[in-house]
Amino acid sequence: MKGEIDEANLAPETSLIEKENQDSSATTTTTLLLTTFVAVSGSFVFGSAIGYSSPVQSDLTKDLNLSVAEYSLFGSILTIGAMIGAAMSGRIADLIGRRATMGFSEMFCILGWLTIYLSKVAVWLDVGRFLVGYGMGVLSFVVPVYIAEITPKDLRGGFTTVHQLMICLGVSVAYLLGSFIGWRILALIGLVPCVIQMMGLFIIPESPRWLAKVGRWEEFEIALQRLRGESADISYESNEIKDYTQRLTNLSEGSILDLFQPKYAKSLFVGVGLMVLQQFGGVNGIAFYSSSIFESAGFSSKIGMIAMVVVQIPMTTLGVVLMDKSGRRPLLLISATGTCIGCFLVGLSFSLQFVKLLSGDASYLALAGVLVYTGSFSLGMGGIPWVIMSEI
């Protein structure tokens, strides 16, 4: 009798768990794949902007007679624009929506690439590069947020890693094409993913979570149903999002000063520290000036850039695969060690050339150092700090 009662009491609970699992493990629909593709086109724009300056350095400086200082400003002003764009992106995305924010950022990117293409003096190059950087900064926030908000829980991790893969692919394509075509043509090619995303934004749904946040419940249901499929049961996920939105509304908005409470000290130190080490670990020097490094070392810049592409894409893919299997910390330690060794080899190469030792073989040492750095950074330091910062 007791067993029958227990069985009867457990039946509704078991049914509820099965219902939850059925609703949460949504299948990958065509709409979800198309929507993700349109979103990560912005990630490709991000990568192509980073990879643009290095392969065109020689051609650009000769064509417009730029000094080292003028070219350095052109390369670095991208990050200034990105910093401003990233600082504003959260507020813009909450105000006008994720989809509109991506379109807003692409307008700056398109205008920037066109300005670079038409430039005949250094100042307009800098203006165009700054505009691309601003759009890139906005995209760096809104794309991963949008992908995370449109995907089911059990698919979210895999889909969000596509963002990092597409950045890597954008950098690699810019390196590869820039080794064979002129800087103006490469700027025009940079427009292609921008236009693809702008056109795609007209056919993809808005983020259901943002629609729920602003109280557009009918549109929320329609968008969620489109993403999950016409025959999918979205009732459980819909109620979950509504409950979460309601709880979020009831919470008081925190101040930036709340981050500096003692209980958050360790998390803040780890999160910010990893991002600082990522950016100050030499990645921008390698990414923006790898062509110049190869030429200064006496090695072919074209062969060096192609070699970087060959290393970068597989190592980024490997990092994505290993991230959940090996854990964040071991992969980050291996990656950081590799970047340290890479920088050491590049520095050793130029030191040996300076003292007239291994003058012929030192160029291969520089190549090895750049490749070790690129592969190691792609393996972990490129993506893991972003993941850890969101997790803590």
Image (cartoon, rainbow, N blue to C red):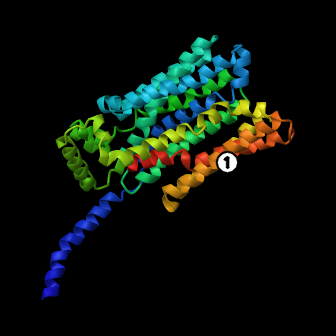
Residue 365 in the image: x percent, y percent? 78, 43
| Relative vertical location of residue 313 with respect to residue 321 in this rendering, above or below | above
- Name which quarter of the figure residue 253 lies in: top left
Q: Nearer the viewer, residue 299 or 238?
A: 299
- Name which quarter of the figure residue 298 lies in: top right
Residue 306 in the image: x percent, y percent? 72, 40
- At x 36%, y 39%, the residue is 205
Q: Quadrant of the N terminus?
A: bottom left
Q: Nearer the viewer, residue 289 or 154?
A: 289
Residue 320 appears in the rendering: yes
Q: Which residue is mark 1?
A: 341
| Relative vertical location of residue 307 with respect to residue 126 in this rendering, above or below | below
> How crowded is the residue under tag 1: few (<14 C-alpha within 10 Å), some, or many (20+)?
some
Q: Is residue 200 left or right of residue 65?
A: left
Q: Amino acid at mark 1?
A: Ile
Q: Is residue 99 left or right of residue 330?
A: left
- At x 63%, y 46%, the residue is 339
Q: Nearer the viewer, residue 67 or 8?
A: 67
- At x 46%, y 23%, the residue is 107
Residue 33 appears in the rendering: no
| Relative vertical location of residue 27 with respect to residue 146 in this rendering, above or below | below
Q: Nearer the viewer, residue 334 or 152?
A: 334
Count numbered badges in the picture. 1
Residue 197 in the image: x percent, y percent? 48, 33
Q: Disc 1 on helix, strand or loop?
A: helix
Residue 334 in the image: x percent, y percent? 59, 54
